[in-house]
Image (cartoon, coloured by chain):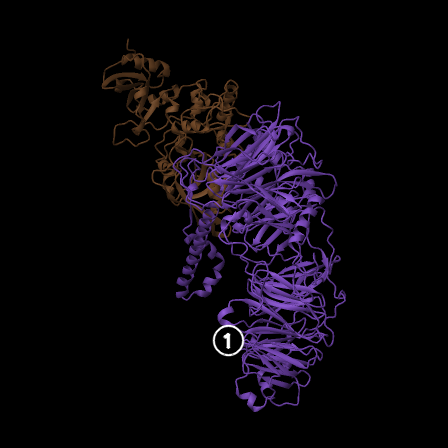
Chain colours: A purple, B brown
Amino acid sequence: MKRFLRSGHDQARERLKQDLFKFNKTVEHGFPHQPSALGYSPSLRIMAIGTRSGAIKLYGAPGVEFMGLHRENNAVVQIHFLPGQCQLITLLDDNSLHLWTLNQRDGVSELHEEKFSTLRGPPGAAPSATQITVILPHSSQELLYLGTESGNVFVEKLPSFQILEDRTISTEAVLQWLPKDAQHCRAFEMVEALQEHPQDPTQVLIGYSRGLIIIWDLQNSRVLHHFLSSQQLENVCWQRDGGCIVSCHYDGSYCQWKVSSEVQHPEPLQSRVPYGPYPCKAISKIFWLRTRKGLPYIIFQGGMPRASYGDRHSISVIHGNQETAFDFTSRIIDFTVLTEADADFDEPYAMVVLAEEELVVIDLKTVGWPVLQAPYLASLHCSAITCSHHVSSISLKLWERIIAAGNKQNSHYSSMVWPIDGGTSLAPDPPQRDLLLTGHEDGTVRFWDASGVCLRLLYKLSTARVFLTDTDPNDNLNALGEDEWPPLRKVGSFDPYSDDPRLGIQKIFLCKYSGYLAVAGTAGQVLVLELNDEEAEQVVDHAEANLLQDQEGYRWKGHERLRARQGPICFEPGFQPFILVQCQPPAVVTSLALHSEWKLVAFGTSHGFGLFDHQQKRQVFVKCTLHPSDQLAMEGPLSRVKSLKKSLRQSFRRMSRSRASGRKRRVAGNSGELQELNARAERAGLQNMELAPVQRKIEARSAEDSFTGFVRTLYFADTYLRDSSCHCPSLWVGTNGGTVYAFSLRVPPPDRRMEDPVRAEQAKEIQLMHRAPVIGILVLDGRGLPLPEPLEAAHDLSKSPDMQGSHQLLVVSEEQFKVFTLPKVSAKLKLKLTALEGSRVRRVSVAHFGSCKAEEYGEHHLTVLTNLGDVQVVSLPFLKPQVRYGCIRKEDVSGIASCVFTKYGQGFYLISPSEFERFSLSTKWLVEPRCLVDTADTKNHYSAHNGSGVKRILNRARNSESLGDGGGVLKEIQSTLEGDRGSYGEWSSQQVAVGRRHNGGGR
Amino acid sequence: MNRSFNKSQSLRFFDCNAVEVKSKFGAEFRRFSLDRYKPGKFEDFYKLILHIHHISNMDVMIGYADVHGDLLPINNDDNFFKAVSSANPLLRVFIQRQEEVDFCNFGTSTLTRKKKVLVTLRNDNLRRRPHLNISMPHDFRPVSSIIDVDILPETHRRVRLYRHGCEKPLGFYIRDGTSVRVTSQGLEKVPGIFISRMVPGGLAESTGLLAVNDEVLEVNGIEVAGKTLDQVTDMMIANSHNLIITVKPANQRNNIIRSSRMSGSSGQSTDSTASHHSLPSSHAEQNFHPDEMESDEETDIVIEGALEPQHISKTPSLPSSSLSRVNGTTFSHRLQRDLTLNNSSRESNGNLHKLLSSLKSDPRHSLVIPRGGIEEDGTVITL
């Protein structure tokens, strides 16, 4: 009968599901992985970033974001906005040109790829003849000039990409206008620079890599001027009035040339090697920007003395006697200068630098050229992210306190309003304040505003101060003397080098009601912190938790524990630690829970777990979970060992697979049947599989498996643990070996809280027979709802739990969900996952799903992520699968490992070390960019060319389509549930027949 | 005294209804005859045996050599009748003391050795008559069986591996591969999962039912088509306590000949050490059901408190026969009922490690756990 109920879908329920669940990948937060190109439109005031994987992302005012992905996975090499239009051109490394347009639909702009084309030369020409090196979108908005490796400049018509052959500026055509002495030195080679005259659209400047620069008259097709430099040319800048050009060269020099028709053999007005006299690296790009006050801004990239500073990634700004070489921690991809230009002057006010790992914007108006704090593109990975924690609906009070603490840290930032402010965000204000906390390898915890489209850093907490590490924090790298030359100044926050990996943060737990925060790290350190608005000097109470207890014969081979700093330590306003518990052995903390009402913190490692009373600053108890035969747990830090092993194994597998396929192809190639083989290429995948000697051992889990004692989850609950008449505080612990321990706690009443000790007593121990790791424990109240968080009911933010009805215990292991009755633990319900479909639970969380139709209606369910990268919703308390969507590629192990769910059916996971993808399972809670970009909307800034080597203009749009249609997915789930079978020939027909017979019997 | 006892050789030829019986106990032989078509009841036969061998105050086990020379038990009316009716011409009966039964020889082919093979005691008759005392079930443990023979194509084999209480590792490996299917477009290659290696001495190898290059079609009733190797691995491990895999054997020569099941002999299936006597088809169907698979569910161990005295109690009140077979739904439902009846009177606490180690060292301990209304069987613990 059960089968009938399952197959016969309840129509009303299906409709309700559609009101509750919908899967969307809404927005990517953070900094694009491997950026490869930068573009900027002065008219739209929008910036574009291209990546090596073929994505382009456009950013305007905070909240204005678009994303597009090229069909080919080729790197974006250049991005140019078409002047004054909502369109942009991208060049990929396969030499293809793509035209993107920001279209408006339903009042919202969307980014679409309109057209693409590849420049084709005459038949038989070398590929370099058409290899594009520079692009110039002409201000006529109709023409595109393409400089190539061969030295020819091709002209294409937009938007058709049609080549206008008669307008091609070939090297031969140029040659015939040059005097004899300029002709003899093979002056051409590739086009390095291509610029339009700042005032006269009929003139373009062409710079060739051998050092020749010409000004070409488009109307009469002739050379107006030529300049010959002895050094290899890197880039050129045409000054605002068109009377002067500046070239930069491979030897680290730059030259200024006067444009004048009187001189036959022009010599440079000025030639300088700014960081000479020793050999210098190339200056790859230069800006010469005029100001009304007279002194120009000279901004150039590179040029550092080769021997001593050749490894620096620098951009130098010279303005009169102010001179700074901004020193970036990662390679500079490109940079541009924002100007308030008019006919004669540039008036630069900000410099935008795209480095490989972060975006840095420097305020050129304010004395000292401070850095601006970006509202987006935060460099999440300035130190590697080791864990993350999400807290929904923060109270305004706590929010403001965190922001206030953060503002005190951010005083060195410029107060300039964010200058890239094109477009209008139409997204409604976020319904609540959400915090995303990321833990980093250097021992910091960063607090991000995750309420809206822009992930913004609010506050940064560093735990390193509590410990004595090898490097003294006072030894600041920036502490360079005044008279240092070159005048380097470190900018940016990306710092991948951790002083001490033991400082790494592994678990975070924030109580949003009390402002208590617990963080735990790689070397077994657990810190309890409290939010304080004032600076304070205090002693951190230090305790040690010996988790091995009386276990004999173990030797810890891993890292030492961190040495705590003695005496009072000065802490800045914000979260200030007052308790430090260090686990012994100092293995990585694998689980952490904080109960702010009972003032207890529980922590677990691979060896055991402990409970600490942070009110009385006293350890309540510890318990060792080690299995006697588990030697591996002693070997050292496991967090890396295991994953490294796994990833090594996987990469070897991949290698052997590709090698196997390569071999196959070569063998066949010898027989000269390549054509036929290609035809069979589709089926080749199968053959490869045959060759790959991948095999898996089938072995039951046993108690002797390593890491069985690894504590996976900790949970505090006020429930009926011992008998059904009185409830008491309890602590639940789940291990990797499928064991659940339950402890009843006796917490003294508030008036005796400081005097009477907290007591704990083991009340239950459950061994799951399938021994799969326990990854979640939850107690459901009499109504089948999850118990509220500590203090949640006390703050009237939640209905108090039903303590009348009988409570239930939900244990989620990697393989199944199981509901037990309480206080007598007997199995009541279960949902098997692995045994039926081979997927394993990786993350589970409770979420509240609101209906998009009815305002008040909502349900609590489990959100589940499996090792296949699927997200599922499983109902509470009946454990019925509701919906299921593919979310993360199953090969993306780090993406799956980094996933966090919010309490309202959204989630985040890392798509690269520096980017979080945000997704939503809820119809009601959806954070996605909705924005409008209009050409008319040029703000008050005059669109202008800044005369630099690169002119970039952007347009951009984003499509936030939902990935799957609900119907299809539902069907898929239905078929999974019903055990709908594929065909197996004769075999399947027999099965079907049997199934039918059985159904008949049931009726 | 000796009813139907006749020493005459000639009887065999003159009276075709009589079956000559040669019974051996220790070093002693006795000869007598039985009526081929009306041999009487097993109970009477048992008494007769005790009488003629002058056995008293001890339990014995009676076995006979069948036409293939396998040692089969006589312990109920059915197999007694079968033994007599199939005797050709002589019925050889072997009597062993219950406690001396040498299990080491069971399951080995003995045509070259002394005929002491006991092929199966897990007779399906049990399902119908569980009250019968069939051998000593707790002295055996099933390690594997072929099931659902009647609903599967002959080219496929559904094998059940019992991990419970078994010290042996499951011990096999699987790999990706391609398999050829006949479709409407002709032959088509599709990805498949294959057994790639057997661990020597492992459970899978010892059953003889699985072999390298067998294609895995289903795991516990769920098709593996479209699943990745890792998924199938996880499915098998999750079901490892009661793994049912349907394979297409690479070697198709040892397939079970369907008609043979009517003969009731195991001789036709050379691979099989397990019973495949005529399963009523309704049972077979139930076995096939994913829902019913849950009847093989494991039971979690719950330990209440840690302070009270610990003891582990056996459950003598359980019909011992009920634990002998866990292959069949009707059966496990009965077991469930038994457990339900039992658990109310049983309360105990114990140290988990002790329980686990006792569980491990002696898989035959039957322990009962308080239960909450779902199906369960197998090894359970009394609390």
**Quadrant housing residue B321:** top left
Q: Nearer the viewer, residue A711 or B237?
A: A711
Residue A485 at x, y percent in the picture = 55, 70
**Looking at the image, residue A701 lies above or below residue A377:** above
Q: Secondary structure at mark 1?
A: loop
| Picture layout, residue B361 above or below residue A936 | above
Please give left or right for residue A209 compared with residue A225 in the image: left
The chain that hosts pointer 1 is A
Q: How many marks?
A: 1
Image coords of residue B303 (percent x, y)? 50, 26
Q: Which residue occupies the foreground of this view, A498 or A738?
A: A498
Asked if residue A605 lies left or right of residue B142, the reply is right
What x and y, as percent, mark residue A358? 59, 60
Residue B185 shows in this picture = yes
Q: Position of residue A868 (x, y in %)?
A: 54, 47
* Residue closest to the eye, B61 or B47: B61
| Quadrant of the drawing holding the C terminus of chain A | top right
Q: Is residue A417 above or below residue B105?
A: below
Q: What is the quadrant of residue A392 in the picture?
A: top right
Q: Nearer the viewer, residue B109 or A702?
A: A702
Query: What is the quadrant of the N terminus of chain A in the image?
Result: top right
Residue at 41% in and 63% down: A666
Residue A456 shows up from this direction? no
Furthest-front residue in this view: A567
Q: Which amino acid type is marked by label 1?
A: Tyr
Q: Which residue is mark 1?
A: A278
Residue at the extreme top of the image, as rendered = B1
**Crowding at label 1, few (<14), some or many (≥20) Cα neighbours within 10 Å?**
few
